[in-house]
Image (spheres, helix red, strand yellow):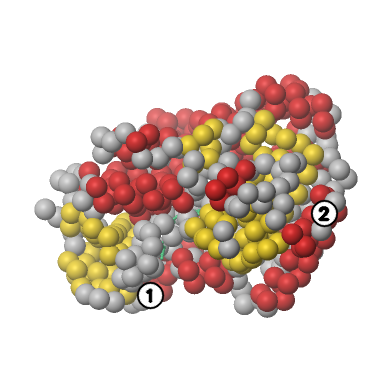
Amino acid sequence: MKRALIIGSGIAGLAAAIRLKQKGYLVDVFEASSTVGGKIGTLEKDGFRWDTGPSLFTMPGLIKELFDLCDENLEDYFSYIQKETICNYFWEDGTSFSVHADEGQFINDLAVLLGEDKSLIKSYLARSKAKYKLTEPVFLNQSLHIWKNYFKPKTLKAFAKSTSLDLFKSLDELNKEYFKNSKSVQFFNRFATYNGSSPYKTSGIMSMIPSLEMNYGTYFPKKGMRSIVDSLYELAKRQGVEFHLNEKVQRIETTSNKVSGLKTVKDTYKAAIVVSNMDVHYVYEELLPEKRKPKRILNQEKSSSALIFYWGVKKSFQQLDLHNVFFSDNYEKEFESLFEKKEIFNDPTIYINISSKEKPDDAPEGMENWFVMVNAPANYGQNWSSLIAEAKSNILKKLERCLGENVGELIISEEILDPIKIDNETKSFRGSLYGNSSNSRYSAFFRHPNFNRIRNLYFCGGSVHPGGGIPLSLKSAKIVSDLIPKL
Ligand code: FAD
């Protein structure tokens, strides 16, 4: 049997391992850290538990697909609920908006609260849905770097209808065409942050993202986000995938421009196939130092990073749900700070995730586990200790204004994750959450392909095509598997 070696056990590495095992390969996964899962981590302290990375779970069907592939029943190992309230939004003037999963109710609520025209909201969402339907098979389910894919009927159809994709205006410009209330524009602009971009720069095509929440729903894994990777890890092991934890890969070995194996901190291994799930920037820098780098791709602007405070809070807040957003009063300036000045804005948009709302054992009784995140620039050597102290003070002041409560006095446990730690702990270049940003209309074409000039070397994960986030990382593993022949 041929051997396939995977570098990294992020969600895409786990998915690629499962898929290649099903294709008949002997599969080994090498992970530098002591646990699998990469950014999808967990933290326990002082009686609280937090998911340290992703908190929004969409498209669970992509996880089910992996269990189906192995002829196993997803429900026996992993369960989740669909959320009726997608997210609670708060503005400083006291306006709040609870986004309901039911499209009809959402349209009605938005129209009543912010005075928008129902038919325009409907048409925006229909256009968003159409964009996703048109682009998914072309941009998200296949390699963008294989010429024959451009001549498939679905690709030609997408290009023929490219004017309906709103590629040539920014997301903000598009949203202003539809909505008169600046709060509605801000609400729809926020979807740019789902891939770490600025709504004032990213293309209007990103308006397809709300349709994912509305049409496919948002979910919560009953045992927390971490159970997504735990269940895939166990599935991979049951299929016979071998895991080598604490075994950092140091080198990709090649002979005549074809992959021949890997050198790790412990040993060397021969392989027919190597799949890298680590940030592509470090692959070239550390594992292939003498090979020509795809500079144009690697030098693209990075996506935003994040500053997260994990707070154990000794009170329960009835007005909050699983997902909560407190909007900045000046969204445009916030993105200017992030991408131009590389600073955290002094009135930041605050996202608070409270998993104990759905999973009470994540916090002691009567308390809550707050995951408090603000957008942060990627790490360019800023003075992070001063940015973090300033951000914490600004967050607490804003929460006091919005909730009428001195949250600082309620914090009984704290941990902090910043761009430097994200980089160090998961090897994400500059701590960016999603690899390259999507701040240009051609950005899809400037993500690293799922392969390069070295034969039998493949790439999956959030830093390559089709993009970051759990769903797209899972899709990248499928694209890679589709490129590799079955044995
Ligand atoms: P990664 O998670 O990047 O893991 C790569 C793995 O490779 C790591 O385990 C690393 O240790 C290992 N590795 C690196 N170098 C080596 C080496 N030389 N040898 C061996 N192993 C190596 N996505 C969502 O869908 N929803 C969200 O709500 C969301 N929120 C997020 C919030 C935060 C704070 C963060 C950090 C990310 C968030 N994301 C979210 C993004 C999402 O987590 C990532 O896009 C996704 O998990 C990336 O997975 P990956 O497969 O690329 O691997």
Callout 2 secondary element:
loop
Q: Residues within 10 Å of mark 2 (few under 14, many from 20)?
A: few
Seen from the viewer's position, the closer of residues 222 and 128 is 222
User: Can you see residue 159?
Assistant: no
Q: Which residue appears at 65% of the width and 54% of the height?
A: 370
Residue drawn 79% across the image and 39% down it:
96
162 left or right of 392 in image: left
Left or right of residue 450, residue 72 in this image: left
Identify residue type, mark 2. Answer: Glu
Q: Is mark 1 within 8 Å of ligand 1?
A: yes
Distance of mark 2 from mark 1, alpha carbons? 48 Å
Q: Residue at x 73, y 72 (%)?
A: 389
Amino acid carrying label 1: it is Glu
Residue 387 in the image, given as x and y percentages of width and height: 71, 72
Asked if 477 appears above or below 77 in the picture, the reply is below
Q: Residue 160 appears at what percent x and percent y?
A: 51, 32
Q: Residue furthest right?
A: 93
Q: Which mark is residue 286?
A: 1
State the image coordinates of residue 311 (x, y, percent, origin top left). Answer: 65, 60
- Residue denoted by label 2: 405
Q: Is residue 201 left or right of residue 230?
A: right
Q: Earlier in the sequence, mark 2 or mark 1?
A: 1
